[in-house]
Image (tube, rainbow, N blue to C red):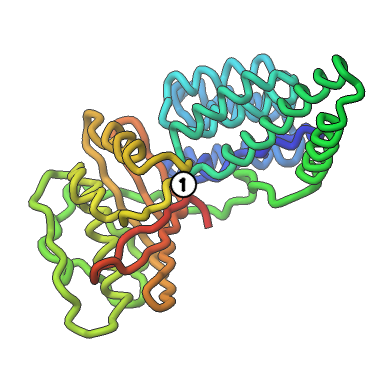
Amino acid sequence: MTKIRLNASRLLASAVSVALLALAPTVHADALQDISKQIKQGQHAQALEQVDKYLAAKPKDAQGRFLKGIVLTEMNKPNEAIVVFSKLTEDYPELPEPYNNLAVIYAQQKQYDKAKQALEMAIRTHPSYATAHENLGDIYARLASQAYDKALQIDSSNSSAQNKLALIRDLMSTASRPGKATKPIADARPVEPVKLAEAPKPISTPAATAPAAAPSPAAVVAPAKPAETPKPTPAKAAGDANTELTNAVDLWAAAWSRKDLKAYLAAYARDFKTPAGESRAAWDAERQKRINKPGAIQVGYENLRITVDGDKATVKFRQHYKSASLKTSSNKVLLMGKRDGKWQILQERVGS
């Protein structure tokens, strides 16, 4: 698991590693699925042998290396696992999962400061990574417990510290109970690899690209080449919120793909709730830094599902992202609201 359960020893692959797997060539995906099944079945020695064979042919493969880190963790070889995950953070700094799994190992070793640093890096890399935020809360609780223990060692009559320590221990006891765990790769259904179009056609107007109210089964890929920013046009049918929302998502993905920062940020409402609670200015600056990195970006989506409730809506879809150094696929949720006659993003998160 990628969540920190300080009383547990198992470590499972994360949802984004499943997403990476979905984008691998089918033959490689099958090999990784087999390795993952061996891990789940407790066949760790066989899994390690297979993943080493896999990496001998593809030494830079992020999915295979991530699985090897999990195998080593399951085999109670934390120091070797740390080496694997640490090297992954160096080679793929955009991925939050290696940081998160490092934090799990450090927490098991009671190295809470290191765990805290690793989780902060995971969140900096992926501000909407909910698991890392939850794990960081657990680490803060552990650090607080240590601090209150120290205070009571110095002054055992400190009733305030006693009460706070009791609250923290009760919180940690609750957090350690079985909860919703991330499924390992072995539980994932086989997924055909998603191919991003090499030369997608530019979006001319929202009406030309908006699908019908029912989602299209094919992935929609926004253009990666710079083009003029499409300007939204008023919906012809009053109250056709599904079409308006689809248009809004199309424009958002297109602006992101063209690296059109102004149009991309305009998709977010002024009262947008930032993932980590930072100021809007700080969030904007971070997004600008990421989007302006060298290299093309392609953002696509599929399986669009829209739920409208008055002037608010929930939009869910499968997002596919590709850049020079990263290729991922993950579930995305946009909470949207109507502002000045157009739909804008109020909040976004990764996951169902």
Residue projecting furthest to the left: 228
Residue 50 seen: no
Residue ID at (64%, 50%) = 187
Is 226 displayed left or right of 342 in the figure? left
Give the answer, above or below, for where 81 lies relative to 132. above
Front residue of this view, candidates 129 and 226: 129
- Residue 315 picture location, percent across and down: 41, 65
Residue 240 seen: yes
Q: Quadrant of residue 252?
A: bottom left
Give the answer, above or below, for where 91 lies relative to 14. above
Give the answer, above or below, for where 18 lies relative to 93. below
- Residue 234 picture location, percent across and down: 16, 74
Residue ID at (12%, 59%) = 230
Residue ID at (48%, 50%) = 350
Front residue of this view, candidates 13 and 348: 348
Residue projecting furthest to the right: 157
Front residue of this view, candidates 1 and 39: 1
Classify the position of the N terminus by image quarter: top right
Front residue of this view, candidates 286 and 84: 286
Crowding around mark 1 (Cα neighbors within 10 Å: few <14, some 14 to 19, many 20+) is: many
Mark 1, secondary structure of its residue? helix
Q: Quadrant of residue 6?
A: top right
Residue ID at (79%, 25%) = 148
Give the tally of numbered discs: 1
Q: Which residue is mark 1?
A: 22
Amino acid type, mark 1: Ala
- Residue 236 picture location, percent across and down: 17, 82
Give the answer, above or below, for where 51 lies relative to 236. above
Is 173 displayed left or right of 45 in the figure? right
- Residue 251 picture location, percent across and down: 22, 58
